[in-house]
């Protein structure tokens, strides 16, 4: 999209399996990749802001299987 305002105000939350492996693979891409953090609400997540300004949040919920 050529509309910079649209891109800078877009964000997406994406649930994945294998979050740590994904995080490790994205740390060298040309984007701002935030810290991998466990959250109090039961999931681990990190944010990545692309050069276009779009923010992607990747997360993995804790398993309820024990």
Image (cartoon, rainbow, N blue to C red):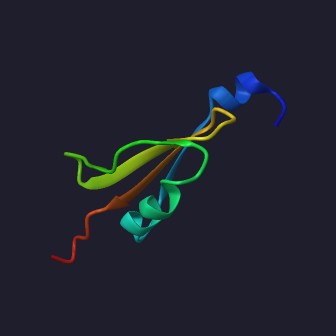
**Residue at the left extreme, as displayed:** 66
Locate the N terminus and report the quarter of the image it occupies: top right
- The x, y position of residue 48, in whole percent, is 51, 44
Q: How many marks?
A: 0
- The x, y position of residue 16, in whole percent, is 46, 65
Q: Residue at x 64, y 32 (%)?
A: 53
Q: Nearer the viewer, residue 10 or 25?
A: 25
- The x, y position of residue 59, in whole percent, is 40, 55
Asked if 13 appears above or below 62 in the picture, the reply is above
Q: Is residue 41 left or right of residue 7?
A: left
**Residue at the top extreme, as displayed:** 5
**Residue at the right extreme, as displayed:** 2
Q: Is residue 61 left or right of residue 15?
A: left
- The x, y position of residue 15, in whole percent, is 46, 59
Q: Nearer the viewer, residue 42 or 36?
A: 36
Q: Residue at x 36, y 51 (%)?
A: 45
In which quarter of the view is residue 6 placed?
Answer: top right
**Residue at the bottom extreme, as displayed:** 65
Locate the C terminus and report the quarter of the image it occupies: bottom left
Q: Is residue 54 left or right of residue 15?
A: right
In which quarter of the view is residue 20 placed?
Answer: bottom left
Asked if 31 appears above or below 44 in the picture, the reply is above
Q: Residue at x 52, y 57 (%)?
A: 26
Asked if 26 appears above or below 18 in the picture, the reply is above
């Amino acid at each position: 999209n050529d509309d910079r305002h649209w891109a800078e105000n877009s964000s997406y939350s994406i649930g994945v399996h294998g979050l740590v492996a994904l995080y490790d693979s994205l740390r060298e891409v040309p984007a701002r990749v935030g810290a991998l953090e466990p959250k109090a609400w039961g999931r681990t997540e990190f944010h990545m802001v692309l050069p276009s300004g779009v923010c992607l949040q990747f997360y993995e919920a804790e398993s309820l299987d024990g």
